[in-house]
Amino acid sequence: MTKLLLAALLTLNLIPAPAQRRRAAPAAHVVSTTVAQGQTLTISGPCAVLYAPNAAKIDHLKQRYGEANFYTSADDNQTYMAKSRAYLQAKGIRVIETTATQLRFAAAGTTTTLDLSSPAYSWGLLLFNGREAPQEANLADPANDVQAIMKK
């Protein structure tokens, strides 16, 4: 009777046959960081860094572009960050989210320091393979950059 029930369930695809079972991709995790102003966040090991402006930078951006334009841009960038986060997690890449203005990447005995307080940085994605200096990636569509830099 048990064999008959199992055969019926397999036939109806209610449970996958052994060949159809897939192992889940390794779970990627997201780490949100808070670093006191003026301090440096040190990063080691392969990861993606999603960075966003801190409160002081937000005030500066509002003054520079006007509140309406700032909020339009902020909404767009938050959407891109959410999509990038989901993509990176699906690829099993560790994701660090931060508003720190100083990032230090440690790789193979060398360090690279980025100053995100520069006007060039507001929202973005950095990919770090753990061996070479981090590289800026396309926040809206990171797939090609992830393949080239992270080899995933």
Image (spheres, rainbow, N blue to C red):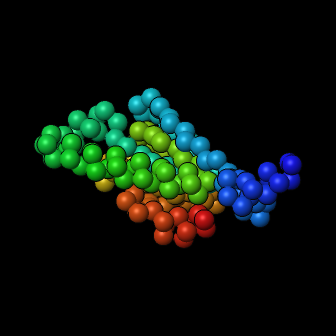
Q: Residue at x 39, y 57 (%)?
A: 139
The C terminus appears in which quarter of the rendering?
A: bottom right
Q: Nearer the viewer, residue 23 or 58?
A: 23
Is 30 displayed left or right of 100 in the figure? right
Q: Residue at x 50, y 56 (%)?
A: 87
Q: Residue furthest top?
A: 36
- Quadrant in the rendering for residue 74: top left
Where is residue 106 drawn, in percent x and y?
A: 61, 50
Q: Residue at x 42, y 33 (%)?
A: 38
Q: Residue furthest front?
A: 1
Is 89 displayed left or right of 54 in the figure? right
Where is residue 141 drawn, in percent x and y?
A: 41, 63
Q: Nearer the viewer, residue 70 or 22?
A: 22
Q: Nearer the viewer, residue 115 or 136?
A: 136
Where is residue 67 drawn, in percent x and y?
A: 15, 40
Where is residue 119 drawn, in percent x and y?
A: 28, 50
Q: Residue at x 73, y 54 (%)?
A: 9
* One can see residue 47 in this view: no
* One can see residue 86 in this view: yes
